[in-house]
Amino acid sequence: MGKEPVRVLVTGAAGQIGYALVPMIARGVMLGPDQPVILHMLDIPPAAEALNGVKMELVDAAFPLLKGVVATTDVVEGCTGVNIAIMVGGFPRKEGMERKDVMSKNVSIYKSQASALEKHAAANCKVLVVANPANTNALILKEFAPSIPEKNITCLTRLDHNRALGQISERLNVQVSDVKNAIIWGNHSSTQYPDVNHATVKTPSGEKPVRELVADDAWYENGLLLISIILFGLSTLKCSHKLHGEFIATVQQRGAAIIKARKLSSALSAASSACDHIRDWVLGTPEGTWVSMGVYSDGSYNVPAGLIYSFPVTCRNGEWTIVQGLSIDELSRKKLDLTAEELTEEKALAYSCLS
Ligand SMILES: NC(=O)C1=CN([C@@H]2O[C@H](COP(=O)(O)OP(=O)(O)OC[C@H]3O[C@@H](n4cnc5c(N)ncnc54)[C@H](O)[C@@H]3O)[C@@H](O)[C@H]2O)C=CC1
Ligand SMILES: O=C([O-])CC(=O)C(=O)O
């Protein structure tokens, strides 16, 4: 007998990530080629017509694995019975808005959607928050859905992880599938720390450390370059492609570089990375490979407990575990702490919006 369908919620489904993501889910990219799915697509009333258009296209595409589509602007209907929730919907920053204004809008969205998930989702529902500020939205969701186990609430840093693998593959001219174990530490923001100290590449003579193969510390980090990007912005980043020292800054600033090029933020890569995140979480990471996920910190690596922070994790039987015992050098320690400080500030700001 075939498998029971899994119900997957995508919020913000009429938006650009949603439009890239739902066909991937319906095709089996997220949960495997033998796993039927029922898609729940939630958006807000002004997007109802567009959402219905997406539903029409899903029907037209005749995906064999797609066993049903719920397209709704009703949060309760959207959340009812879902096994997996991908939270893409949110309020984007508009001209003239302060960070606090955006935070305040998203805090109230994630508070109310947390309550709906808590009351109406299936037991053991797994949640992935994509919408920015992703880590802090996930933290708010966790706070207001206390009966969802904290291990089930995560945020997307897999896009940053995949960006790091992509940069290494370009630098070394190797297949991206031969590169593994990069790490994104911390926030899905420009303070994130893309760490290649433990990353390796499969070569004909075995696995080799990326740092040994690159053999150029300046490619990895160049303090002057970072400072000039902070001071002079993206035009410096553009020039930096000709320079060494670009890896960390390129990964940290990749989202902004895509916006500059496309006039829209990353969508296909975000959707694909969301599929990678859920697939590895549900079906497991390959032996000897870890991935980056934003998860609830238990204090590992002296990261303050109680933040949603990106760590290296392995997954087995539907559970993630933080990879322990990695050496952290002095430079890395500073970067782990810097991004934790930003998350602590975001958390305080989010809580101030609640009061
Ligand atoms: N974590 C990550 O790696 C990445 C995160 N993002 C973030 O993902 C989010 C979505 O990006 P896009 O799809 O490009 O944006 P978009 O603006 O194209 O789509 C967002 C959708 O969310 C909907 N929405 C707004 N409030 C909602 C609510 N309360 N409930 C349900 N839906 C709601 C909007 O109507 C819209 O259809 C943004 O916050 C973006 O910054 C984008 C790229 C990567
Ligand atoms: O930078 C943005 O606004 C979109 C985003 O999160 C990314 O591409 O990583």
Image: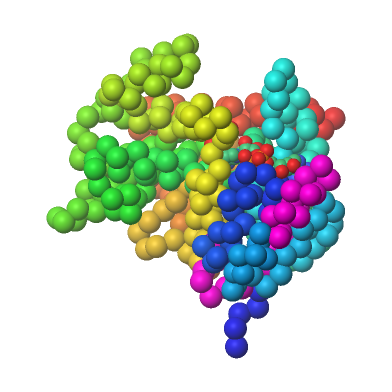
Hey, which quadrant is residue 139 in on the image?
top right
- Residue at 37% x, 63% y is 287
Q: Nearer the viewer, residue 197 or 158?
A: 158
Identified at 38% across, 37% down, the residue is 195
Residue 297 visible, this angle: no
For residue 23, say whether it is visible.
Answer: yes
Name the residue: 76% across, 25% down.
Answer: 101
Q: Which residues are magenta?
A: 30-56
In percent of width and height, residue 243 lies at 28, 21
The image quarter in which residue 166 lies: top left
Find residue 154 and report its horizontal and vertical position in percent: 61, 49
Q: Toward the viewer: 69 or 202? A: 69
Q: In the figure, 233 relative to 4: above or below?
A: above
Quadrant that contains the C terminus: top right
Q: In what quadrant of the picture does the N terminus appear?
A: bottom right
Q: Ligand 1 sits in which quadrant?
A: top right
Name the one closer to the observer, 269 or 6: 269
